[in-house]
Amino acid sequence: MAERIRLAMAGCGGMAGAHLSGYQDIKKRGLDFFDIVSVCDPVLERAEGFAKRIAEFQPDRKVTLYASLDEMLDEEDLHCVDTSSPHHLHHVIACACMEAGVDVMVEKPLGVTIRAARKMIETAGRTGQILATAEQVRRWIGPRVVQWAVANEAMSGRSRMFFAQSSRGPEGMPVEAEEKNKVWRHEKLKGGGGAVIDGMVHYADFLIYCYGEPETVSATCGQLNRSYTLDENGQRQPMDWPETLISHIRFKSGVAGTWTWTGAAPGKAISFTIHYGDLGSVYAEGNYPMKPEFHQRDKTCISHEELLEQYLASLSEEKLAALFPPELYPEPRELTGDHGVPLEVYDFLCAVRDRRRPELDGMDGLIAQALSEACLESSELGRSVSYDEVLSGEVRAYQHEIDEAYGL
Ligand SMILES: NC(=O)c1ccc[n+]([C@@H]2O[C@H](COP(=O)([O-])OP(=O)(O)OC[C@H]3O[C@@H](n4cnc5c(N)ncnc54)[C@H](O)[C@@H]3O)[C@@H](O)[C@H]2O)c1
């Protein structure tokens, strides 16, 4: 595409602000092949705040503000939209964009349910528009190193099992109940399944990145903090917002592991991931494996720095440039902090410009989402579920109510 890319942003909330910083980063590095032409949010002050930020790094092109997506799609001649809206609007916004001939990148989880996600994928297939899933975690260099080490039989041998644990909080609250300001993500019909489908879908994507498609899932999801909100009469209303996941997952490759993620663990917080193979283990502390190291059978340890060097040396020039475009990040060794979001928005812009597939398209988004949904479905049904019966939409006991609410 020879023209400058005309991009709009739909939803100007918290995560969209990180995307905006990503676009700013790209321009700051002299990669000036796109314009943010409009922003849209029903809360106009948020759109105004974005317009002010954009004016600072894009002084030559004024941004038009909209409170309605439909009006923006009618008025503007757009190539693409980057949307970070509440989950229950992902399919509404993405399908409207694609029907209007506009490519779209949607924040994770792809849809509020499997049916919502499938509707988006069907629309992308029919219209020929690009549907990208915004997923930054696997794009960080630490998770890239882990995936390489797990897949590298010369280093790890054959994969055996994994354990992923993130337990933290809560702090400063009565033990019996936690009061929360009710926001959309705390409502089942808008959030789709609490933290299990919100933050945890990042990790679902990462596990699938390492091990391929899951086979069976057995999980317990719950609201252990007993959080509540106050209704208009000041009465406590319980929140239907699982913040805890305890799961056992078996992958089609035969690898099995446990994945636990909770914000309801008072006292001692602990977070780590470890992936065992015949020849050793890749270990990292933290919710996400940002600084992995490799422990060999003889108990010697390949430090994070050395592992990173080995990883970078293993990449062909072409692969290195695809994962860490040198025009954006000339020195991958120095990557710290959030390079995932700039990489993801840059990948989207390049996919739109070059008419190519983004690294994570709609199907990738659905595949990751289906693991989170499988955890919710297993917990709802009180039995182990097969990943395929959830991915296909055959099992949707938990999601049924949400599908009904949106006519899906
Ligand atoms: N990748 C990450 O690490 C990450 C982190 C946080 C959130 N997210 C994702 O980003 C999305 C938004 O989450 P958030 O935390 O920014 O929420 P938020 O509530 O801060 O922002 C959502 C914004 O969407 C706007 N909005 C509502 N209806 C709209 C419509 N019809 N058209 C356009 N805009 C509309 C809201 O007014 C609000 O400004 C979610 O999908 C969430 O999963 C991703």
Image (cartoon, grey):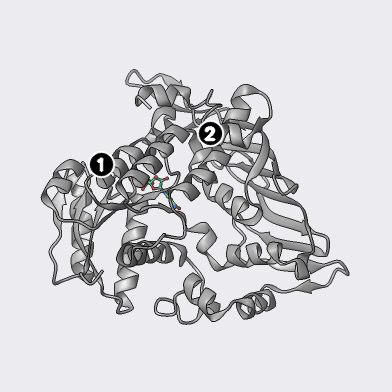
- Residue 216, compared with residue 160, is above or below; it is above
Q: Is residue 127 visible?
A: yes
Relative horizontal placement of residue 189, taking residue 380 as reference (left or right): left
Q: Where residue 89 appears, x then y in whole percent? A: 33, 37
* Rendered-image quadrant of the N terminus: bottom left
Q: Secondary structure at mark 1?
A: helix
Callout 2 crowding tier (Cα within 10 Å): few <14, some 14–19, many ≥20: few
Q: Amino acid at mark 1?
A: Ala
Total numbered labels: 2
Q: Residue at x 25, y 41 (%)?
A: 96
Does 269 sit left or right of 81 as displayed?
right
Q: Which circle marks residue 96 in the picture?
A: 1
Q: In x, y percent, where is residue 331? A: 49, 81
* Residue identified by numbered label 2: 392
- Which circle marks residue 158 in the picture? none
- Residue 339 vs residue 311: left or right? left
Q: Amino acid at mark 2?
A: Ser
Q: Which residue appears at 32% of the width and 50% of the height? A: 128
User: How many angstroms separate mark 2 from mark 1 (CA)?
Assistant: 24 Å
SS for callout 2 = loop
